[in-house]
Image: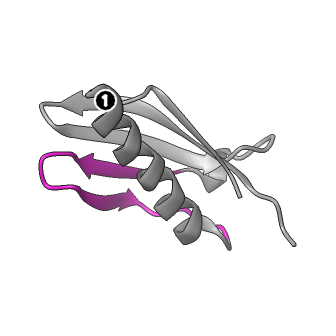
Amino acid sequence: MTISHFKAILIRQSNHHFWYQFFPDIINAGELSGEFCYRADQEQVEITHPVEHTQAQIALAGLTSKLKREIKKTETAPEVITLIS
């Protein structure tokens, strides 16, 4: 079983669009960072810069799921999302 830690940090927002940088939460993960935009008004995710990591797609699904729940609950986008899978 593999345990992965991923983190997404809000880098900018415009109306209902939120851009996050996401990466494995490990030292020197800079080259592994990616970016996605979540469009809250359409509940859609667009990967604007993919990350090269074996579990990136699964982690992105988990991060966006947590993001959707947080926005529905608080009506604001969190600055940091952490996923442990």
Q: Position of residue 10 (x, y in %)?
A: 41, 31
* Magenta segment main secondary structure: strand
**Residue placed furthest toward the right:** 1
Q: Amino acid at mark 1?
A: Arg
Q: Which residue is mark 1?
A: 12
Q: Is residue 18 above or below residue 57?
A: above
In the rendering, at what x and y percent does residue 13 appear? 24, 30
Coloration of the structure image: one colour
Residue 43 in percent (x, y) is at: 21, 55
Q: What residue occupies the far front of the structure in this picture?
A: 73
Expressed as whole percent of the image width and height from the top left, the position of residue 68 reads 35, 47
Residue 30: say if magenta: no
Judge whether residue 78 can be spotted in this image: yes
In the image, is residue 54 above or below residue 44?
below
Q: Is 23 placed left or right of 42 in the picture? A: right
Q: Residue at x 57, y 50 (%)?
A: 33
Q: For the point 53% across and 47% down, which residue is it? A: 22
Give, as a single range, the part of the protein colored magenta.
Answer: 34-53
Residue shown at the point (39%, 30%) measured from the top left: 11
Q: Nearer the viewer, residue 27 or 62?
A: 62
